[in-house]
Amino acid sequence: MSVQRQDKITTPLSDTVNESQKLVKLEKVGVLCLLRGILLAKTPSTEDTMDRDKALDCLREALGDETAKFRDGQWEAIDRVVNKREKLLVVQRTGWGKSAVYFVATRLLRDSGSGPTVIVSPLLALMRNQIDAARRLSLRAISIDSTNREQWGEIIECIGRDQYDVILISPERLANDQFREQVLNSIASGLGLLVIDEAHCISDWGHDFRPDYRRLVNVLKMLPQNTPVLGTTATANNRVVEDVQSQLGEMGVQRGELMRESLALETLDVPDQATRLAWLAQFVQSQQGTGIVYTLTKRSADQVSVWLCNNGIDAKPYYSGVSLSGFPESNSCREHLEMLLLNNHVKVLVATIALGMGYDKPDLSFVVHYQSPASIVGYYQQVGRAGRGIDSAVGVLLRGNEDSEIHEYFRREAFPNNEVVTRLLQQLSRGDGYSIRDLEGYFNLSYTRLAQLLKFLSVETPSPVVKRGTKWFRTPVPFELDQERLKFLTHQREEEWDEVCEYVVTDQCLMKYLRNALDDQSTADCGKCSNCLGHSVVNVSPDSQAIRDAMLFLRRAEMPLELKKQAAPNAFVIYDITYNIPTGLRGSEGRVLSRWADAAWGRKVKEGFEAGHYCQELVEAVADMIEQRWDLSASPPQWVTCIPSLRAPTLVADFAKRLADRLGLVFSPVIKKLLDNAPQREQVNRFHCCHNLDGVFAVDADMPSGPVLLVDDTVNSAWTLTVASYLLRLNGSGEVLPLALANTGGG
Amino acid sequence: MLRYRLSVQDSAAVLSDDQWAAFVHEFNDTGEGIDRLLSNDCASLIESLPQQGFDATQIQVLLKRGVALAIASEQWIGVGVWVLGPHDDLYPKSIVDKLGFARAPILFGYGNIGLLDGKATSVHLGDKKLTRNEQMCEHLGALLAVHGQTVIVNIDRTQAASVLNGVLSREGCGVGLGIGDLIEKGSSHYYRDGVMNNSLTLLSLTPPNCDGHIRVDVVEEVIAALSGNHLHFA
């Protein structure tokens, strides 16, 4: 080995050493200081300064109304952004005209030679509305999103040729590294104005906090000092405003009054669902215009929508992931539904908060909350969709029995658990990149939950994880979950929920209550709400027949049960199921009687489970469902079997036997349980659901012939019924018709 | 802003080393601080320079990339990469002293800045069969660690990882410097633990996830500047 040792180096560039001594001034400015100080473009000189008259001309021209005037605060906001190049947060009520501010500002900036405006907007609905609004103001707008991915190259070229005045992107896109590299960098060099719509999402104290906004904040912090930034929101209380300011640094705030003069508010405490459904049907039928009914879950949105349709009301469900035949993906389906309501082709959308921010239908005449929202701030935003462009509209909040439990669940699931985070980071440290599918094998967490967890960690700064391609890597950044902060935030959310509960029972003016909760310190009563009037603002009182109909509807709200078709790779070693379950070995579509603990049969199922015996009423309910509403004429069941249990051996078997007796069929318990596996309800992702069942059951080949009803009490992932069906078919059974008493899954 | 492309897609005509040196030279003759480049009238100042070896228009175009730089920086800092320029207090003095301010590159790094004190022992691996021997390289690293040496290697070279592995196996300290993708290297199990327990510093002369426009010989110059001793394997 030849080792050459040198005690001192000589550099070929030693003649440059002296230069450094001249560069004292340069040395005083650090890289990060530089980032914060760099000018984007020239600041308008005095001659360039836009005056109010010019801006007013713009507004009038855009609106096609020669008498149009600025609303209070609009010109001031434009002036601060265009002439003073400030960072400004505008908190104004819905319908005040926040978009007019940034579109007029854009017009003025463009006319003075600035680059285009980039609007970061959180929802598809909002983005589409913005494009239309911009066009009405003679601005050329384009949205860059997942629906036009193939056109990104062309769009970027057009931006390069300065053919767009307004570019809309979502915060999710902004946080996507690939998008940033491919698209954003091309736009960024000529940016004239940055608009953050629904800026309250920046605050994790806000009801709408979105992790992707955290990365947006990081970018904003580093922007050149004179890049004008306009944040807009209608729903920020002082706490949220202060949080946004503390995150973004020097940012001015402009607040307006939040009074909504056209809205008449009411609250009703209606604990049981049947009465609420009956009330809702009668209310919607009594309304002239169109509206939105908000629910807390997708399942409720579906259920309420069906109920309204059954009552002759044209209603459609709307939520993230909603599907309709003819729409291959959910986004286009949602767009279609939004258009239906916008054009009055549907009476009501029954929606989750997916239809919250940004949906703009000026003549929306009512908003009803079928279940209570999580916070007053969120409620103000949602109810504020009604009556923007009409003289009178109604907002009713119905409080139900189930609301508190649902919100408790949401709060519990909102933040990751420290132990899971630690284990996840340890696993990522063991290798060089894992896909979420890879991680499913190591963690009993759903794909969605793992994705959320990684997203949560990826927006921490600095982040302990990084995504490259489809794989996640552990970065060399030490990380500890800030549990105190998460505890604090959970506490905040509990307080917000308490505020909603108080709203339902308060006897003061409801609009004043909302305004005060949003730190608009108005003392005037609205004179329109049920508390001000001393009587209901809607004349609705469902009769007992309507309530009975609703109860019957709830009790007949069984759901189809789809079994699984594809197993997780390497999960069924004993059963040797590699991936696809062969068609001939699958069970058919089955039925689930209820949702676990719901107001109809679900509560009886829960009581029976806890007591160790399912009541005869449930046997009758299932028999009624089979005989009256489940068309089995093509393959009528000849016998009944059930999923066995080692822990409660008689619970399901006894029920299945009584059901068989009631239907006049043979009960034959041919499935045996060989292993005492972990409870299946605790298995969350596909791999663990499958692996937990491997080798657990065996089937006695000596079984009756013909189609069989396969009974279990609860179903979640449906893997138990899938495996049992597979084994029955493998051992020569006829068609398998799966049946469960209650679905314990979320949604 | 003037010397680096900020992403793979960035096609900006950034200044070469020579153009940068020429610009710095002329700019300093004006007696102005660099903050003048951020002022509204910087265009007239830049145009007033003799422009021997660079083009004022090119510089003005590059200076308009403030938002792009903010976006790129957010990405770097977001995954824990630190960025040091010669004007930063923590920037290794030895690099500026030996290369001169105009030639001193921006450093993108993971890990302990304290290891960049100019006293490390650099290990230069040649192309001989011996230096391709993984075990031998690990052994060498371990040996240096036992003797309390901080070892610095060109991390883009074959077996550089083995040397650093050897260093870390004996609880020594190491510095890996190159022009490759820092995030990829920092996220690799070869280096991650060392960086996390402050015994390894990874440096790149190019921004993460960007095309390198740095000459390979600059890597060797920086290694030389950060080293007190050198071990060459011919």
Image (tube, coloured by chain):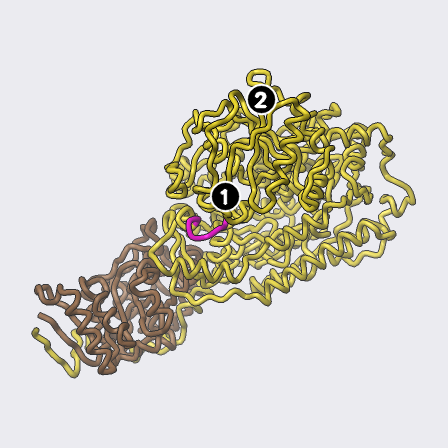
Chain colours: A yellow, B brown
Q: Residue furthest front?
A: A702
> To which chain does the residue with label 2 belong?
A
Q: Amino acid at mark 2?
A: Pro
- Mark count: 2
Return the residue at label 1: A167
| Residue A112 appears in the rendering | no
The residue marked by circle 1 belongs to what chain?
A
As helix, strand or loop, the secondary structure at mark 2 comes to loop
Identified by mark 1, the residue type is Ile
Magenta: main secondary structure: loop
Residue drawn at the location 68% of the way across and 21% of the way down: A628
Left-right relation of A360 to B11: right
Q: Which disc is residue A637 wearing? A: 2
Which of A456 and A589 lies nearest the eye of the viewer?
Answer: A589
Q: Residue at x 54, y 59 (%)?
A: A417
* Residue A443 at x, y percent in the picture: 46, 52
Quarter-wise, where is residue A370 in the image?
A: top right
A384 and A411: which is toward the camera:
A411
Residue A472, compared with residue A648, is above or below; it is: below
**Place of residue A240 in the rendered image (x, y in percent of width and height, measured from the top left):** 65, 59
- Callout 2 crowding tier (Cα within 10 Å): few <14, some 14–19, many ≥20: many
Quarter the C terminus of chain A occupies: top right
Magenta segment:
A440-446
Q: Where is residue A344, by image quadrant?
A: top right
Tell me, yes or no, whether the highlighted magenta stretch contains residue A444: yes
Q: Which of label 1 and label 2 is nearer to you? A: 2
In the rendered image, which quarter contains the N terminus of chain A?
A: bottom left
- Indicate the position of residue A362 as horizontal and vertical percent values: 70, 36
User: What is the spatial separation of the Cα atoms under label 1 and label 2, in whole angstroms?
Assistant: 60 Å
Instruction: Using the image as rendered, state which of residue A18 and residue A183 is in the foreground.
Output: A183
